[in-house]
Amino acid sequence: MLPARFTITHVRAGDDAIVVGGDSEIRVLDAASGRLRWRRDGAVGGILVGRDVVYGTAGGALVSRRSSDGRLNWKRDGACPAPPEYAKNLSSPTIVVRYGDDLIAGCWGGDMVRISAASGSVRARSRSAFAVTKVDSIRPLGRCALAVAGTTDGAHLVSQSAIVDCKQLRAIVPQGSDLSVLGAIGNTAVLDDLCCNGRPDVYQPATIILANLATGKESPAVDLRPEPDRYPANHRPLGQGSAAMLDGNELYLVVDRTVYRYGDPRSLLSSPQRIPGELVDFPVLLRHGLLALRVQVAGGAVEDQVVRIRNGAIEALWRRPETGAVVIGYDASEMPDVVRFDTMNGPNMTQTLVRTTDGGELQVPCAPAAVARGLVVSICNTQTLVGNRYLQYVAAYRWPEPQRPQSTAAARTPSG
């Protein structure tokens, strides 16, 4: 249980430690016992990077400490300052990732900084390559390239993406609004320009652009419009009900409840292959070429599934019969290897987590806040008053051994 006046702002989990962040304090817990290892006042945005905790301070410093005992590794003043108009508790990294011998940090206001993981020395900084309110994700992409995503605020949030080089953090592919970086094949990045796909009078579910990661040169845009007679433009929903994904060298496009295979994006098929499957509604696209979906199987029953596409067919990694109304949740930035199936049974909701790497399944009573390889951490509230208020607490759960689907054949769905 946390102190009564401690408000949890975020949680990060590692293999042996849990970081719980408050408004101006972090606490590091032992993952096995929940015991408090150490705490630090004036710390903001604690993030686990391997065996270390990296956090910011109100003055814009970045600090690295050992997660085991809080011993100081290094402190770098002014490494990640927030713009002056930001609140003081935003002078911290929004994300830190390990890249070789470096840490790449994204800061409030869009700054990015490359720091030596061992010494904390600043090796590169960029204040212009990515102008956003908040950097949400940084992903390695091909040879010495990073796909960066974030949001700008204002009247409404707008997603932004760019590709920067891993050394100087300079833009390879300039920042674009509603631009999705699907992945890379060798030295070629595959982008989906989503700028105009919210118009209901246009059937344009994807616009594919290839970018050379060495030169930044972009190919002419190619609009993908599979089976246009099936999708009259004036009947399209807002947002188009479509999404593209890259799995290895294969490009797939989902339109409404149909999955199309376009093959290698460097030589797209002129007539895409429609993947057989009776999808009940629009699937959720996951990392690593996976999908979470509801599908109708033989006899008319509905199953929840996590699937991959192999040899032109849907193959289940995890599946279960549906027992109630389901909402599928997925956060690619915070929990890229876990998908959540929330099932309503009367007044109660069951939350089932599925680990996409192996199909491991776990039911938890509270919404998950962080995951690690063998651990799920949730933020819960007491069901009764403690004194005159409800209290927050952190609960950790271990993943059980996964159960494989009975057979590949049983997971295949009827052709549609």
Image (cartoon, helix red, strand yellow):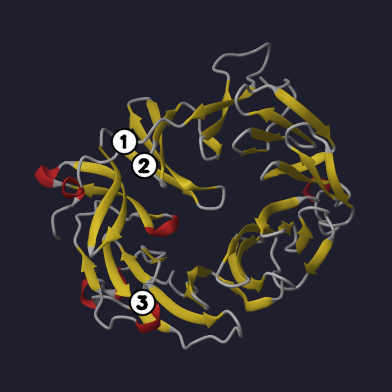
In the picture, the disc for residue 403 is 1
Which residue is tagged 3? 264
Q: Secondary structure at mark 3?
A: loop
* Rendering coords of residue 263 (x, y %): 32, 75
Distance in Å between CA atoms under marks 1 and 3: 33 Å
Q: Residue furthest top?
A: 387
* Rendering coords of residue 189 (x, y %): 51, 75
Residue at horizontal 58 percent and vertical 23 percent from the top: 381
Q: Is residue 277 left or right of residue 86?
A: left
Counting residues from the start of the chain, the first of labels 1 and 3 encountered is 3
Q: Residue furthest left?
A: 299
* Rendering coords of residue 371 (x, y %): 54, 39
Which residue is tagged 2? 359
Tell me which corner region of the image, top left, top right, bottom left or bottom right, holds residue 40: top right
Mark 3 residue type:
Asp
Residue at horizontal 37 percent and vertical 55 percent from the top: 290
Q: Secondary structure at mark 1?
A: loop
Q: Are marks 2 and 1 in contact (CB under 8 Å)?
A: yes
Q: Quadrant of the C terminus?
A: bottom left
Is residue 202 visible from the viewing direction of this image? Answer: no
